[in-house]
Image (spheres, rainbow, N blue to C red):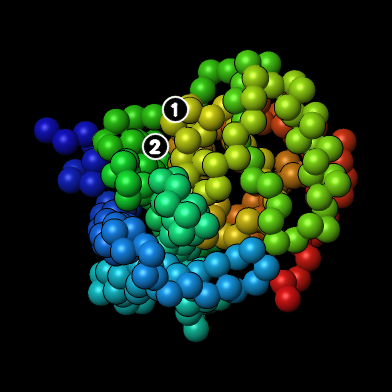
Amino acid sequence: MPHPQSPLATTGSGLDAFLATAVAAARAAGDVIRDGAANRASLAIERKRANDFVSVVDKGAERAILDVIGRAHPDHGFHAEETGESSDAASASHVWLIDPLDGTTNFLHGIPHYCVSIGLKRDGDMVVGVVYDPISERLFTATKGGGAYLDGERIRVSTRESLAESVIGTGIPFSDLSFIDAYMGSLRTIASRSAGIRRAGAAALDLAYVAAGWLDGFWEKNLNPWDVGAGAILIEEAGGVITDFSGGRTHVDTGQAVAGAPGVHRALLEVIAEFPALAAPRRPRE
């Protein structure tokens, strides 16, 4: 018998069809990504902005996702990294947040740490999240009120309640360096109070690792809704906390994300408060 949160079973939450769509879309994107990885040397690559790249694989994976979602739920809106917002994204009750390949730079360099991230907002609240690692084929799933799972097995955030002995994930600024001094200050402080820092290069996968208890916490600035949405519901359904840098609930929209087991989250917020420049609004992209 499949576990209740398995994509092969129903949860009774009313979100089963949406979860099944997200899983099918993520797996379709994963097929595109694996094919691209086998032919990485010949891929066409574009520079979107400083240190930010996109390949034909990103675009092909996104088309595969939108095709699955469009056929299953044609009345839904979407906000996707490469395609942008659908015309009804501002008014639709259901909006999908889509990152077809989070960790493109890793992918292009052959570093096997990247993922597909698909989340669903219903009336402004995250209700479904799927993060899929196409290399390991690990599938992280969550539904609102239904718990968080890895390959059908329940996951929970770590039990650590302070920075001591905790391993913390982060993302080092790469395109907007206007807050680099404040960030480096927070990095130095957290490194001195924790068991170590990890910068793996795929925020959505890092957030899934927090939900699984593999990372005890995470902080990063200047993320996008498609980077954060799926991971946010994974963490909350796994018993963790995720907020913006002020402790508010704007993390999906502002791109400020600090997350972890409850005590670790509190400790991270205390450090971030020592560096007010981190909470400044995102600088407009050029």
Element at badge 1? loop
Q: Is residue 89 visible?
A: no
Image vertical order of residue 262 relative to residue 94, above or below: above
For the point 42% across and 67% down, which residue is it?
58
How packed mark 1 is, by other alpha carbons closer than 10 Å (few <14, some 14-19, many 20 or more), is many
For the point 73% across and 41% down, which residue is it?
247
Q: Which mark is residue 113?
A: none
Element at badge 2? strand
Residue on which disc 2 sits:
148
Residue on which disc 1 sits:
156
For the point 55% across and 47% down, which residue is it?
201
Q: Earlier in the sequence, mark 1 or mark 2?
A: 2
Residue 282 relative to residue 234: left or right? right
- Distance from Cα at disc 1 to Cα at disc 2: 7 Å
Where residue 17 appears, as percent x and y from the top left, is 26, 57
Amino acid tagged 1: Arg
User: Dots 1 and 2: beta carbons under 8 Å?
Assistant: yes
Image vertical order of residue 89 relative to residue 257, above or below: below
Residue 186 relative to residue 257: left or right? right
Amino acid tagged 2: Ala
The residue closer to the viewer here, 172 or 18, is 172
Quadrant (top left/top right/bottom left/bottom right) for the N terminus:
top left
How packed mark 2 is, by other alpha carbons closer than 10 Å (few <14, some 14-19, many 20 or more), is many
For the point 63% across and 56% down, which residue is it?
223
Residue 50 relative to residue 283: left or right? left
Where residue 86 appears, as percent x and y from the top left, is 48, 79
Residue 257 relative to residue 246: left or right? left
